[in-house]
Image (cartoon, helix red, strand yellow):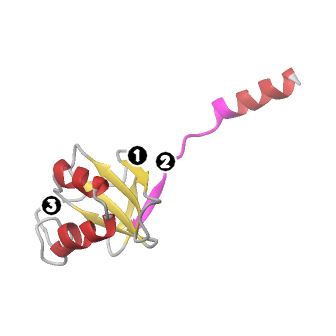
Amino acid sequence: MIRSVATAHALLWTAPVVTEKVEIIGRGTIDLAPFACTDTPRSSIVQRVCYDEARRYLLVNIRGSYRDYCELPAAIFNAFVAAPSMGQYYRQNIAASDPEGAVNCQARATISRPSDS
């Protein structure tokens, strides 16, 4: 018994660390290592949010597809995750910026998204 526990621990310590990556529609693959991600089981529309506060970069999983938003202030992100209806807040305050809005990464040619490391 002790030997099997020791073997299991040894395998865990030597296993390679692989970070999760997601595909952004029309943008490519993003490594989630710098993001703080949270599943959102209380929303039927928003399934997961990932936010990199240092870069003010938001990823939102809407029904299985990720979308990205650049230069999104932490205050908006905090209001988003605390909103009584995340889907409604998302549509009115974040997605409403599509496709020409200030936080839409594709519309902001001067903003480069964080590269995949």
- Residue at coordinates 30% horizontally, 51% vertically from top-left? 51
**Under tag 2, what secondary structure?**
loop
Disc on res. 11 = none
Which of the two residues, 50 or 108, is positioned nearer the viewer here? 50
Say above or below: 4 vs 40. Answer: above
Q: Which residues are magenta?
A: 12-23
Which of the two residues, 51 or 42, is positioned nearer the viewer here? 42
Name the residue carrying label 3.
111
- Residue at coordinates 67% horizontally, 33% vertically from top-left? 12
Q: Residues within 10 Å of mark 2 (few under 14, many from 20)?
A: few
Say above or below: 23 vs 15. Answer: below
Q: Position of residue 111 (x, y in %)?
A: 15, 60
Q: Amino acid at mark 3?
A: Ile
Tell me: 86 left or right of 69.
Answer: right
Name the residue carrying label 1.
33
Say above or below: 82 vs 92. Answer: above
User: Is residue 82 on the magenta stretch?
Assistant: no
Q: Quadrant of the N terminus?
A: top right
Mark found first going from the N terminus, 1 or 3: 1
Tell me: 110 left or right of 34.
Answer: left
**Under tag 1, what secondary structure?**
loop
Mark found first going from the N terminus, 1 or 2: 2
- Residue positioned most to the top: 2
Q: Amino acid at mark 2?
A: Thr
Q: CA distance from mark 1 to mark 2?
A: 6 Å
Tag 1–tag 2 contact (CB < 8 Å):
yes
**Under tag 3, what secondary structure?**
loop
Mark found first going from the N terminus, 2 or 3: 2
Name the residue carrying label 2.
19
Q: Residues within 10 Å of mark 1 (few under 14, many from 20)?
A: some
Tell me: 73 left or right of 4.
Answer: left
